[in-house]
């Protein structure tokens, strides 16, 4: 009760603050001002599982949305509910039940988004769900949900859904090092982005898709350079620029333009967000410079290789070593690539085995119940047969005695008086 009173007080303060224009906030969603405040409160609490504050804020959002007939705010209520469901599902030991709860929440968002006419949230539900499956090591389910998303978008001829579906499926294949399939979906996603008049798609960045697509081509190839250049041209946010700097440093090193390489390297390393955005460590840059300068031994490279976090970095360093005719380092890097790919394949197989095992476990449970039912029926049949047999035996004995009595075989002879 104390929590509810506290939340009610906070909501009252929000409502009071709305009476003062100077306290108004930016509202990028374009929804009712009070709905926006409730939405932001729910959004800030969605990951807090220690109390029910989120539920109070999100219910207040729905109540206000219905009062002012704000359909977008109403849709956002269900989006937040899906996020909350996913937050609990990620740590739920009963994965099958957790998946069912997430699926139910996804269906609710899609239903409401269809009713209210906000397709972006219809497809956002797919995005949130596939991210949940990836984070819980269920990549097979993630691929299925994305294929469903793409199929629905194709049926509805929805350009936004097609753009998201192509891009997410491409990224999934890229993370699995399946360059052939990744390239096909990336190219289609980029084509949609370049030709669309949809403002929502146009506002989204194409940089990461271009950089990831560049990695599906041979290192330093014309195609790779083309899409790295496109990545720079399409940069929208700060992380886009970091990606462009990183890949530009690679091209400069391949071309032997070390001052230009150093310029891009410094732009990367001086940014506190670089390590999070790109996952390139200082050891990686040390390897680039050691190979380019010719003063790094294969043994030294082998030790530094453990600090690399991304198989594509090894692919690049192998190509750089080949161009520098450092065959010993190229061989070590090549072995590292093979080892990483083998580990990735093993991990993927393990994930799929886990998924199949979970499904199989459910199947086995059903089969065991069926087996128990069959055993019960067999036992019942045998018991019934035995009972019928016993009754038949008793009945036969009774009839036998009755016949004997009728014929006098068992009746003692009477003595007659003369």
Image (cartoon, rainbow, N blue to C red):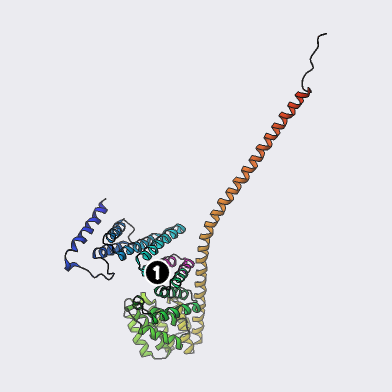
Q: Is residue 392 above or below residue 106?
A: above
331 is within the stretch colored magenta: no
Q: Quadrant of residue 115?
A: bottom left
Q: What residue is drawn where x is 43% and y is 61%?
A: 103
When asked about the image quadrant of residue 271, the answer is: bottom left
Answer above or below: position of 50 versus 336: above
Q: Is residue 220 visible?
A: no
Residue 254 in the image: x percent, y percent? 43, 88
Q: Judge by depth and name the residue closer to the eye, 102 or 188.
A: 188
User: Is 75 positioned to the left or the right of 12 in the image?
Assistant: right
Quadrant in which residue 12 is drawn: bottom left
Q: Which residue, given by chain and number where applicable, does mark 1 sit on?
A: 123
- Seen in the picture, residue 149 relative to 404 is either above or below; the reply is below
Residue 123 image position (x, y, % from top left): 40, 69
Residue in the foreground of this view, choosing between 7 and 115: 115
Q: Mark 1: few, some, or many residues within 10 Å (few <14, many ≥20)? A: many
How many numbered badges does the structure rendering display?
1
Q: Position of residue 87 (x, y in %)?
A: 37, 61
Of residues 143 and 300, the one nearer the viewer is 143
- Point out the image quarter for the C terminus: top right
Residue bounds of the magenta highlight: 122-145
Report if residue 139 lies within the magenta region: yes
Q: Is residue 217 visible?
A: yes
Closer to us: 261 or 220 = 220
Magenta residues, dominant SS class? helix
SS at badge 1:
helix
> Residue 33 at x, y = what percent?
24, 65
Single out the residue that lies furthest toward the right. Answer: 418
Residue located 45% across and 57% down the image: 97
The residue sitting at 22% across, 56% down in the picture is 9
């Amino acid at each position: 009760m104390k929590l509810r009173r506290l939340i009610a007080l906070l909501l009252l303060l929000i409502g009071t603050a709305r009476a003062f224009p100077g306290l108004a906030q930016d509202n990028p969603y374009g929804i009712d001002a009070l709905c926006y405040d409730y939405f932001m409160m729910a959004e800030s609490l969605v990951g807090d599982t220690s109390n029910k504050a989120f539920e109070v804020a999100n219910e207040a959002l729905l109540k206000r949305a219905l009062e002012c007939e704000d359909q977008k705010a109403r849709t956002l209520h269900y989006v937040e509910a899906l996020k909350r469901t996913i937050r609990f599902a990620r740590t739920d030991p009963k994965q099958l039940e957790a998946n069912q709860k997430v699926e139910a929440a996804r269906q609710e968002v899609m239903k409401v988004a269809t009713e209210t006419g906000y397709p972006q949230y219809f497809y956002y539900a797919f995005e949130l769900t596939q991210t949940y499956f990836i984070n819980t090591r269920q990549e097979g389910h993630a691929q299925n949900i994305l294929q469903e998303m793409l199929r629905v978008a194709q049926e509805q001829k929805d350009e936004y859904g097609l753009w998201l579906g192509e891009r997410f499926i491409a990224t999934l294949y890229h993370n699995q090092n399946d360059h052939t399939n990744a390239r096909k979906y990336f190219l289609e996603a980029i084509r949609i982005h370049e030709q669309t008049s949809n403002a929502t798609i146009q506002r989204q960045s194409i940089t990461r898709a271009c950089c990831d697509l560049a990695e599906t081509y041979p290192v330093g190839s014309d195609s790779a350079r083309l899409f790295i250049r496109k990545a720079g041209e399409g940069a929208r946010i700060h992380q886009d620029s970091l990606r462009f700097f990183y890949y530009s440093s690679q091209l400069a090193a391949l071309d032997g333009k070390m001052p230009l390489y150093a310029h891009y390297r410094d732009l990367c390393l001086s940014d506190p967000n670089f390590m999070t955005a790109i996952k390139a460590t200082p050891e990686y840059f040390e390897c680039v410079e050691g190979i380019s300068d010719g003063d790094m031994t294969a043994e030294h490279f082998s030790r530094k290789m453990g600090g690399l976090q991304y198989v594509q970095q090894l692919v690049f360093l192998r190509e750089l070593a080949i161009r520098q005719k450092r065959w010993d380092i190229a061989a070590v890097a090549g072995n590292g690539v093979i080892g990483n790919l083998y580990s990735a394949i093993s991990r993927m197989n393990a994930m799929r085995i886990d998924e199949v095992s979970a499904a199989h476990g459910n199947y086995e449970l059903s089969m065991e119940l069926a087996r128990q039912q069959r055993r019960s029926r067999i036992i019942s049949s045998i018991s019934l047969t035995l009972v019928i047999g016993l009754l038949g035996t008793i009945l036969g004995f009774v009839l036998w005695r009755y016949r004997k009595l009728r014929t006098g075989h068992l009746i003692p002879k009477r003595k007659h008086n003369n």
